[in-house]
Image (cartoon, grey):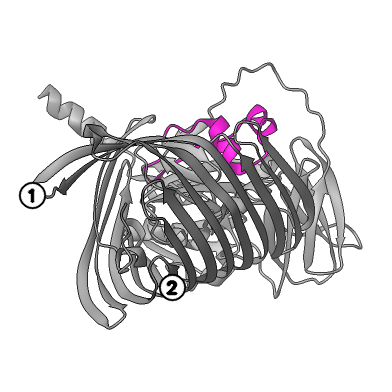
Amino acid sequence: MLICAMSVYVMAFAETFSYRFTSTPLPKAIQRIMENHPDLDINFIYNELENYNTSATVNADNACDAIRQTIGLNPVTVVRSKSTYYIEALQHGKYVFTGKAIGTDDEPVVAATVLLLAPRDSTVVTYGITDATGRFSIPCDRQKVIAKLSCLGYKTTYVLCNTFDIGTIIMPERAVNLGAITVEAEHSQLYSDRTTYIPTQRQKNASQTGDELLAHMAIPQLGMITNGNITTNSGRNVAIYIDFLPASENELKAMNVKDVRKVEFYTSPSDPRFQGNEYVVNFIMQQYEYGGYVKGFGHLNLISNSEQLLGSTRFQYKKMKYDFIASGWNMNSSHYGSDITETFRLPDESGKLADFDRHSSTTKSKTENQQYFAGIKATYTSDKIMASTEIDGNASNKPHNDIDGIVSYSRDVYPTSTYSSTLDEKSRFISFMGYYYFKLSEKNSLTFTPYYVYSHTEQSSSYIENAFRGIFNSAVDNTNQLRANLSFNHDLGSFGNLLAFTRGSYEYNRTSYSGSVSSFDKAKSVRVGGGVTYSISKDNFYGLAGFGYDFDQLKFKDIEENTASPWADLTLRLLIKKKHSLSVIFHYSTWQPSPSYKSDNIITS
């Protein structure tokens, strides 16, 4: 009886409405409440509420309180008539005044009150509240008004509005006497689909590049971080994004580290902007209306005797950003070598298999390597479109990779001798990369990512061992690669996300060999595939399941092969309290062999 009584008590005072919104459009937040509580009768005008966002945490046991908590400080009224709730914006008008409020530290001013006053007598015409990014959007029937912005800790600021786009308004800080408090900083937050880390000022000051910042932050899910190559603790590759746009190694070096606000680590994210990558690191940067910066980066490694210089510049005006990057890298060393012991099992003169070891060591080496890069990138970002186009050029020269050494054999099958090898390689690349994200509606989005690269490589090598015939090889390769991915994402609300996509790739290799062996190889590979993934996040649980097919056509010289193979993904994650999570990940797929596995030129020594 006591247990029953306690259960009735808990159920009577249970919080029926529990939500957490982050910069969510107000109509979408209200729709989410209606979807979870179909018995509610809520009437609202969508067009008049779509200018307002909410970042409320809702915990209520009745609908009226839940709706009021959701609305927060937005100028919206809630009226209840019998069992129906009427939600109406206080502001009406055929014009809309927009702008953004920031402090002198370039940080957005959140929850600032924006009053629109009549110029003649300063009477209040209407008002609004800035959102989490400092932006505001206020409908009004008048064309010329005075905007009065006020917020605790900032000086009241007045702006005469001659246009509807007021732009960025800087509010100077004002000192406010506060009582003594103790603040304990929390630099990480664990969610069901991601972990968020906030870098400290000391970590930023000690870092010149994005990958250096990750190394200083010591994110526990990350393992090796070297030259833009970032992996997890288990050695899996991690895709890098900056403000939800794909980022390259050079972009990490050109990054203005002081603008990093937080770093997010995702595992199997459902966000369509991450293109289905299993592991993602996303940098969230400080946003500006206009401006730019110029950055120079230099790096000297005394161990490998290498140096690198990089220069970058960024210009931003409203929704457009332009980036120019150029870099050069040089390495010159005579301290590389190796000791290798190989075991061979070969038939002897009688035809029986016999084992012997071959041991080679380095006595002298010379290595030179130069790489040059230049790229231009244009990015457009708005509430409904994210588009970036990048064109890069790359040149690589390896005039020397020369090694001299000693070779010895076990059981005296061959006499001890010396060897020398040389390698000369030149490569040229030109590439195009595009990323285009379209938000079709509040629930639907489309992403298109094309990629093309052309490469030309020339390589010459030699290997000479005393008492044996020398091996000389030269090769010239021309390769075209084309990839594209088109995906459609549908948000099912509280029931998860559905992602459908189709992808294709084309690679054409033409390689001409001369020297000890002469031949000409042509290889083509085409892959077309698609699939569907479903993901859901509920409280402390996250799950993802996907399935699809890939159709391959491989053609080498006159040999052609057509195959089809399935792929499957499954991820289950449980968030335990706030600092721990338990994950189960399963992945099955096939990939195409590279042309080096198909060539007739297999040379052994």
Question: Are circles 1 and 2 on residues that touch, CB within 8 Å?
Answer: no
Could you tell me residue 254's position as x and y percent?
68, 49
Q: Is 61 situated left or right of 392 in this image?
A: left
Answer few, some or many: residues within 10 Å of disc 2's Cα (few below 14, many 20 plus, some between 14 and 19). Answer: some
Q: Residue 350 has which mark?
A: 1
- Tell me if residue 219 is in the magenta stretch: yes
Label 1: state its secondary structure.
loop
Q: Residue at x 39, y 29 (%)?
A: 579
Numbered circle sitting on residue 511:
2
Which one is in front, 341 or 188?
341
Q: Earlier in the sequence, mark 1 or mark 2?
A: 1
Pointer 1 local density, CA inside 10 Å: few below 14, some 14–19, many at least 20: few
Residue 587 spot, x, y in % from top left? 25, 53
Q: Is disc 2 placed on a helix, strand or loop?
A: strand
Q: Which residues are magenta?
A: 191-220
Decide whether residue 477 is among the magenta residues.
no
Q: Is residue 419 above or below residue 446?
A: above
| Frontmost residue, 184 versus 430 | 430
Residue 289, image x, y percentages:
75, 58
**On screen, 33 above or below 50?**
above
Residue 383 visible to the viewer: yes
Residue 73 seen anywhere in this rendered image of the structure: no
17, 414: nearer the viewer: 414
Residue at 69% in and 72% down: 93
Side of 120 where 398 appears, left or right: left
| The N terminus - image quarter | top left
User: Left of 315 or right of it: where is 181?
Assistant: left
How far apart are the alpha carbons under marks 1 and 2?
39 Å
Q: Residue at x 46, y 35 (%)?
A: 362
